[in-house]
Image (spheres, rainbow, N blue to C red):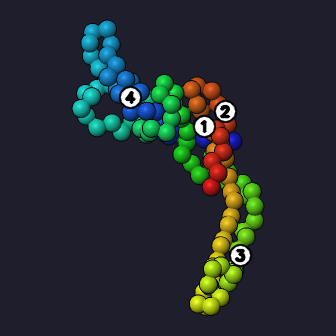
């Protein structure tokens, strides 16, 4: 399946390193650094601290480029056996669902590779 790349992620430091790059004549390659940036290399830039400095992540941002995997069915437990819940006519309810978000169609540091699953 093919996805159109729409966004890129990098750290604030890396973003500004790219943004302040100059050519041999001292001109900024990406225009005035004080101007708002809506596109960088045709992609929407996303600045984050959740990625290591010197690396980047490019993806489509499409919901179709991710898969939710069920690790466990919905489990609901109801109990009156906590502390004095029975005497006070209270009920404890615990609901649990385990899923994993598996992104695909991402490029990390120039290589198409799976990114670690995010447990939800």
- Asked if disc 4 and disc 2 are in contact, CB closer than 8 Å, the reply is no
Residue position marked by numbered label 4 in the rendering = 13
Which is more N-terminal, label 2 or label 4?
4
The residue carrying pointer 2 sits among few (fewer than 14), some (14 to 19) or many (20 or more) residues within 10 Å by Cα, namely: few
**Which residue in the rendered view is the most extreme toward the top?**
24
Q: Calculate the distance from the C-alpha at mark 4 to the C-alpha at mark 3.
A: 47 Å
Q: Calculate the distance from the C-alpha at mark 1 to the C-alpha at mark 3.
A: 38 Å
Tell me if 57 is positioned left or right of 79 in this view.
Answer: left
Helix, strand or loop at disc 2? Answer: loop
Q: Decide which of 8, 30 is in the foreground and name it.
A: 8
Q: Calculate the distance from the C-alpha at mark 4 to the C-alpha at mark 2.
A: 24 Å
- Asked if disc 4 and disc 1 are in contact, CB closer than 8 Å, the reply is no
Helix, strand or loop at disc 4? Answer: helix
Helix, strand or loop at disc 3? Answer: strand
Asked if one can make out residue 8 in the rendered structure from this viewpoint, the answer is no
At a point 28% along the width and 26% down the height, the residue shown is 31
At a point 48% along the width and 24% down the height, the residue shown is 54
Label disc, if present, on residue 61 of the rendered structure = none
Q: Give above or below for 8 relative to 62.
A: above
Judged by depth in the image, the label closer to the viewer, 4 or 2, is 4
Which is more N-terminal, label 1 or label 2?
1
- Asked if disc 2 and disc 1 are in contact, CB closer than 8 Å, the reply is yes
Q: Give above or below for 109 relative to 46.
A: above
Residue position marked by numbered label 3 in the rendering = 77
At a point 66% along the width and 32% down the height, the residue shown is 113
Q: Which quarter of the picture shows residue 110?
A: top right
Residue position marked by numbered label 2 in the rendering = 113
Residue position marked by numbered label 1 in the rendering = 106
Which is more N-terminal, label 3 or label 4?
4
Q: Decide which of 63, 101 is in the foreground and name it.
A: 101
- Asked if disc 1 and disc 3 are in contact, CB closer than 8 Å, the reply is no
């Amino acid at each position: 399946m093919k996805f159109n790349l729409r966004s890129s992620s990098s750290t604030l430091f890396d973003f500004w390193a790219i943004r302040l790059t100059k050519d041999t004549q001292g001109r900024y390659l990406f225009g005035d650094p004080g101007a708002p940036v809506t596109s960088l290399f045709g992609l929407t830039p996303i600045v984050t601290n959740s990625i290591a400095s010197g690396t980047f992540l490019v993806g489509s941002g499409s919901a179709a480029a991710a898969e939710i995997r069920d690790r466990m069915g919905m489990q609901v437990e109801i109990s009156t056996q906590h502390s004095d819940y029975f005497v006070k006519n209270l009920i404890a309810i615990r609901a649990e669902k385990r899923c994993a978000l598996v992104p695909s169609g991402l490029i990390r540091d120039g290589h198409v590779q799976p990114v670690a699953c995010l447990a939800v």
